[in-house]
Image (spheres, grey):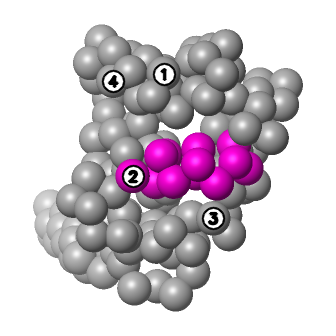
Amino acid sequence: MGINKMSDVLTNILYLVAGAIISFAITLFFLMPGPILVFDSNKDGAISYAEFRAANSAIFEIADRDGNGYFSVKESKLLAQEGSGNDIGASVAAWLNFKMIDPNRDGKISWEEARNPKVMKEVFSVLDKDGSGAVSIDELKGRAAAAIFLR
């Protein structure tokens, strides 16, 4: 077999391998699910208030990035930036939302404050934009909470 024929055979093999890799990648892309709601225990596509309450300690641990026992405005801004990708808008929104749910207005939320039913209801109502009683993926997209609830 001449060098040209061997080169043609190798080229054809490379094209076949490349085609198989591209086909595999396309298949994976279409089979991969969209964002997953982390605390959606009944897998109905939304987080109910009961699921939110049940996951409260895990949510607090995720939000308390530095592990000091408090969720701060700074941590709220970090989550907002991760969730939305918009630094300035996210920071302003995070600050406003944080002020709304910080019960004693000291700039941080302790575990005791986070467990308070009134605070939990306020946080949930901020997340539940449409007032349906459940938080959907669409309600979380582009928001600070996406960094906690979507994977």
CA neighbours of label 3 inside 10 A, class few (<14), some (14 to 19), many (20+): some
Residue drawn where x is 60% and y is 17% of the image: 105
CA neighbours of label 4 inside 10 A, class few (<14), some (14 to 19), many (20+): some
Q: Is residue 95 above or below residue 32?
A: above
Q: Which residue is mark 4?
A: 93
Mark 1 or mark 4, whichever is nearer to me: 1
Amino acid type of the residue that numbered disc 4 sits on in the rendered structure: Ala
Q: Residue furthest right?
A: 68
Residue drawn where x is 57% and y is 64% of the image: 52
Left or right, 142 with reference to 67: left
Q: Which residue is mark 2?
A: 125
Q: Position of residue 95 (x, y in %)?
A: 43, 18
Q: Are marks 2 and 1 in contact (CB under 8 Å)?
A: no
Q: Secondary structure at mark 4?
A: helix
Q: Secondary structure at mark 3?
A: helix
CA neighbours of label 2 inside 10 A, class few (<14), some (14 to 19), many (20+): some
Q: Is residue 48 above or below residue 143?
A: below
CA gap between label 1 and label 3 equals 21 Å
Q: Earlier in the sequence, mark 4 or mark 2?
A: 4
CA gap between label 2 and label 1 equals 14 Å
Q: Earlier in the sequence, mark 1 or mark 4?
A: 4
> What span is in magenta?
114-125
CA gap between label 4 and label 2 equals 15 Å
Amino acid type of the residue that numbered disc 2 sits on in the rendered structure: Ser
Residue 117: say if magenta: yes
Q: Which residue is mark 3?
A: 53
